[in-house]
Amino acid sequence: MKLQLRTILLTAGMLMAAASCVKKDNFDAPEASLEGNLVDQGSKNNIQTATGNVTIRLEQLSWSATPAPQDIPVKMDGSFKNSKLFKGHYRVSIKGGAFWAVPPVEMDIDKGSKYDFNLTPYLYLNSFTHQLDSNQLTLRFTMQAPIAGMPAIAEIQPYVNTTSLVGPGASIRDYSDVYKVAVNKEWADMSPADKSPEFVIPNLVRGRTFYVRVGVRFNNDDKSSNLSEIIKIDIPK
């Protein structure tokens, strides 16, 4: 009985000692936020991207001169948002993407912070049109380079999927990668025909809805792409 009592008292003492060592966490919950857009400074429209193509990198300078980065993925419509950030002073930059580089910005992030990046794409994909003949789809577009000196063009291709999540890494191979065209040329070496491609995609499944866009991939460090808007195609039965 005495042994049991000693054991109980010893255990209680250890628990009290452990509790006295626990300190209250003085850190505030992450209630700050940052949202914004990648904006084409020419048209003022959002730049179209693809899943995993571009991220916004945050580095919290309030705590360290060399902080560990955290990334916000940019959505396909060119918007981004993170509503679980700690309030503080940050360096904000862009990683990836087929547009001319812009320098990082430093800003204080608090509740409801907003910032838009004004960018210039390597290429504009203009006059994107489609023609549907039964279950055969023809796509046409033209390329325009607003600034000389961009990376070499690696390839161009259509992207076709059964959901609106369509682009590099999200497409049906037999309707997309099969029609990829290797270019591997500098812009100055491309002919007018090279700059106005056409894709003919036959034998699309009847009665199905497809989401379609086109893209131009560059031979830069991250092999990023300029992409068209997404169009919805209903194939007749």
Image (cartoon, rainbow, N blue to C red):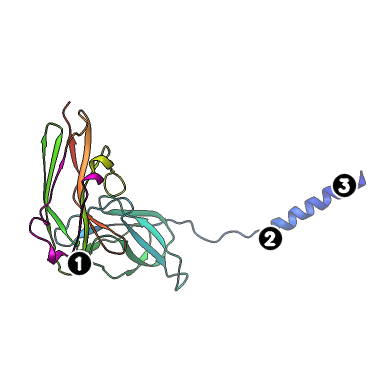
Q: Find residue 101 and report its horizontal and vertical position in percent.
A: 26, 68
Q: Is residue 140 above or below residue 110?
A: above
Which residue is drawn at the image coordinates 55% and 61% (left, top)?
26
Furthest residue toward top? 237
Residue beneath label 3, please?
A: 5
Residue 108 among those drawn in magenta: no
Total residue callouts = 3
Three-letter amino acid code at the position of disc 1:
Met
Furthest residue toward bottom? 65
Left/right of residue 202 with respect to residue 161 in the rendered view:
left
Magenta span: 177-201
Element assignment for label 1: loop
Residues under numbered marks 3 and 2 in contact, where contact means CB atoms less than 8 Å apart: no
Left/right of residue 157 with respect to residue 7 in the rendered view:
left
Q: Is residue 202 above or below residue 34?
A: above
Element assignment for label 3: helix
- Which of the two residues, 29 or 234, is positioned nearer the viewer here? 234
Three-letter amino acid code at the position of disc 3:
Leu
Q: Is residue 178 above or below residue 88?
A: above
